[in-house]
Amino acid sequence: MNFRYSDEDEAFREEVASFVRTTIDPEVARKVRDNLPLTKDEHVGWERAIGARGWTAPHWPVEHGGTGWNALRRFICEEALASECAPRVNPCGVSLIAPVIIHFGNAEQKTYYLPRILMSEDWWCQGFSEPNAGSDLAALRTRAERHGNHYLLNGQKVWTTQAQHANLMFCLARTDNSGRKQEGITVLIVDMQAPGVSVRPIITMEGSHEVNEVFFENVMVPVENVVGEEGKGWSYAKFMLEYERFGTPETGRSKQQLKRLKEVAATAGTGGSSLLDDPDFAARVAWVEIELMALETTMLRFLSEDGGKRSAATDAAIPMLKVRGTDIQQELSELFVIAAGARGMAWHHGLDGTLDGNADTRWMTSSASHYFNWRKASIYGGSSEIQRQITAKNMAGL
């Protein structure tokens, strides 16, 4: 099978890369390159820049603002954006709740929310996990009781990423207890500024404020904020998580990080030597590069089959792709710590995301912070342990 891009695809890739180089704030690109956190304004500014180009949601149907590109063209675009250190688009709106609204929402929801997502007029967060309901999401206890034309929402969510910035949440809540625990769950759109919503920061081990606890106390949610059918939320959540897992491998960003690792390792040795001359370190870099090439080839193979459309084969492969992509990302983060050496351990990480060091050395002071933060990759979107179990069952035909 020939995985070379056509001349047309290569020209498109250069078009995207050139757009990033001429549009992005160089400081934002440097932050992305060195794994430094961005402000909300920096995220929104970039998302509106690509939104004006029509590139925010290439995977959406054309009638809702998508590009009409095939799966390979979308992959090329994502790779080109990553190669030039463009920020990730907030997936909660574009890749999680939007597909659910497109497939299951009503006409009013599509008309109102989708254009706002395309231009980052709303900032969404995901209200899934709860205390004692993480991997066993169906054990959630947040409850929404119907009272006329609204629900009263009570309960708690945890590990809610960027909730401190969000104005909207898509929330799983139990509306019926009469059946199996997977039944009676409903997707609600919750106004984060509504009375009764409170957000408390969780400071993670690297010192950043990225995730939160969110509490609901008699929060009034209009009936029209139900997405799809009441009680069908479990099916919608599974649909949503498949999108999240397929986007998790991020081979383009891992390739950019591998390139950056080689650059810094070349000057990180002792006595004038390169760290890449160390056989143990070089072997680990080679392992990452080989695994990344294999993962990218596997993804391209799936994208080339049936025009990249979802099928039983691709759905079965998604857990495997998620696990391998996560392993590579975490290995890269560990190699950056090794390259930084002792200099990387003495970082200062403020709650505003600032780190000590100049533009040339910030990668050192961010390496340990990024390493600790990226432990999350093997948990979100379905833990690696669970994904391995799913892969084994798929292979065994169970």
Image (cartoon, rainbow, N blue to C red):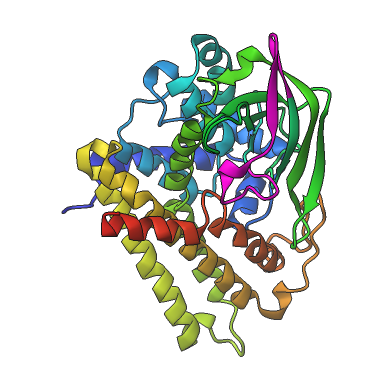
Q: Which residue is drawn at 48% across and 31% down?
A: 236
Q: Is residue 245 left or right of residue 167?
A: left
Which sits in the foreground, 163 or 13?
Answer: 163
**Horizontal side, residue 101 vs residue 140: left or right:** left
Number of dots carrying numbers: 0
Rendered location of residue 82, percent (x, y): 48, 48
Write down the region rendered in magenta: 129-152
Q: Answer above or below: position of 181 versus 357.
A: above
Q: In which quarter of the image is residue 78?
A: top left
Residue 63, x across and y down, in percent: 40, 16
Q: Is residue 17 visible?
A: no
Residue 81 in the image: x percent, y percent?
Answer: 47, 44
* Quadrant of the drawing holding the N terminus: bottom left
Residue at image position (50%, 18%) is 105
Q: Which residue sits furthest bottom?
A: 271
* Residue 149 visible: yes
Is 49 covered by the magenta stretch? Answer: no
Q: Tell me what residue is drawn at x 51 percent, y 34 percent.
A: 234
On the image, the x and y values in percent for residue 85 come to 54, 49
Q: Residue at x 26, y 55 (%)?
A: 397
- Residue 134 shown in magenta: yes
